[in-house]
Image (tube, rainbow, N blue to C red):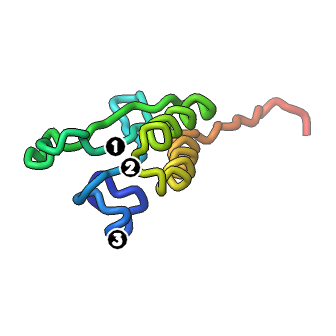
Amino acid sequence: AEPGNLCGLHSYKFSGLTGKVLNVSGSKKGTKESIVMTTAHKQASRDARPGSRLLQTGLKKSSKKGQAQLTKALEGGFYRQDLAAMAAAKYIKVKTSFKKKKLSFKSRRASK
């Protein structure tokens, strides 16, 4: 799906090409992983410039602070309030995808 499509569905509601864009995704630079919220620029003139149309805002990885950031940006800023619950759910999914499986080593010397 195009950047800015929250659910990856072919639908006008979730489209990242028209109107107000919203997406929550993970990004990786080297070994550092971060959660990013993509929105459309507030200036209407930026729609004609595809390179600078989308804004990426980093979200905190702490669940409480990250969800507070999302709520403030969407509901406090009156920006895509209809997708606020879906964005919060995707935030949790992205955060859990960062968790690595712990390796468990069994000692050969341990008694059976």
Query: How far is disc 1 from disc 2 in space, using C-alphas?
Result: 5 Å
Which residue is identified by label 2?
23
Identity of the amino acid at label 3? Ser
Label ID, residue 2: none
Q: Position of residue 91 (x, y in %)?
A: 52, 45
Residue drawn at the location 40% of the way across and 46% of the way down: 79
Height in image: 68 above or below 40?
A: above
Helix, strand or loop for disc 2: strand
Residue drawn at the location 39% of the way across and 38% of the way down: 36
Which residue is identified by label 3?
11
Q: Quadrant of residue 31?
A: top left
Residue at the extreme left of the image, as rendered: 48
Helix, strand or loop for disc 3: loop
For the C terminus, which image quadrant?
A: top right
Residue drawn at the location 11% of the way across and 43% of the way down: 45
Pointer 1 with pointer 2, Cβ within 8 A: yes
Q: Quadrant of residue 2?
A: bottom left
Q: Badge 3: few (under 14), some or many (20 or more) residues near its Cα, within 10 Å?
A: few
Which residue is identified by label 1?
38
Query: How far is disc 1 from disc 3 in space, using C-alphas?
Result: 18 Å
Q: Badge 1: few (under 14), some or many (20 or more) residues near its Cα, within 10 Å?
A: many
